[in-house]
Image: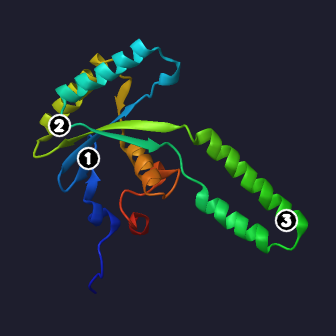
Amino acid sequence: MRRKGNSVQELIGIKSFGKYGLITDKGELLFYSVTPTNISVLSNTSIEIKIRHLLMVLCAVPDIEIVCTDSSECFDENKSYLYKKANQENNSKVRELIEKDILFLDHIQTEMATARQFIFVIRCSNKKEEQIFNTTNRIEKILASQNFEVRRMDKREIKRVLSIYFEASLSGELMADSDGEQYFR
């Protein structure tokens, strides 16, 4: 039987997880989680220093990619569904419970609205495992030398970021490595 289309993995070029990151059609991607700094409490001089440090990183690693994502899921679809249900509900007690759920989701989303995560991504093309290992260490040293709190993300963390990005689940680290993998155990 011939398949009609590509899987999501094939469409975005993901092959599998490697020892150091995510293997794609164009090489291995290394992910580094960077602890954000609340610049609203810093002086202008401190902000300028932070910017200078970032410029130094960009000069030392010009092909670095910077990703800023929400660190949690968006609840807009859930709230739309609940609003629709509340408008259709005849029982006032049930409608009241639905409205409390909506308020709860609003509260959670407000708390998480400022929760951002910053990720530096390095693409390693045509490199052997030893070269990738050396690259991971070099990048960590460069980032740390510019006073960034950074650590290389493991498979579980990368899965979580991808699941949030693709709006799949908050527990992305629990997702199978391959679509349908659970059916072949």
Relative image position of residue 91 (x, y in whole percent): 88, 71
Is 3 above or below relative to 97? below
Q: Earlier in the sequence, mark 1 or mark 2?
A: 1
For the residues labelled 3 and 2, the Cα–Cα distance comes to: 56 Å
User: Which element type, helix, strand or loop, lies under badge 2?
Assistant: helix
Residue topped by disc 1: 18
Farthest residue in the right direction?
92
Q: On the image, numbered disc 3 is attached to which residue?
A: 94
Disc 3/disc 1 C-alpha distance (Å): 49 Å
Residue for point 36% across, 20% down: 50
Q: Disc 1, disc 2: CB below 8 Å? A: yes
Are the residues tagged 3 and 2 within 8 Å (C-beta)?
Answer: no
Do the residues bearing badges 3 and 1 touch, measured as CB atoms within 8 Å?
A: no
Question: Is residue 38 visible to us here?
Answer: no
Which mark is in front, 3 or 2? 3
Quadrant hosting residue 90: bottom right
**Residue 94 position within the rendered picture, expressed as x and y whole percent measured from the top left:** 85, 65
Residue under pointer 2: 132
Relative to 110, 16 lies left or right:
left
Q: Residue at x 23, y 32 (%)?
A: 136
**Residue visible at 47% across and 14% down in the picture:** 43
Say which quadrant the C terminus sits in. Answer: bottom left
**Mark 2, other Cα within 10 Å: few <14 / some 14–19 / many ≥20:** many
| First along the sequence among labels 3 and 2 | 3
Quarter where residue 12 is shown: bottom left
Residue type (three-letter) at the residue carrying disc 2:
Ile
Query: Mark 1: which amino acid?
Result: Gly
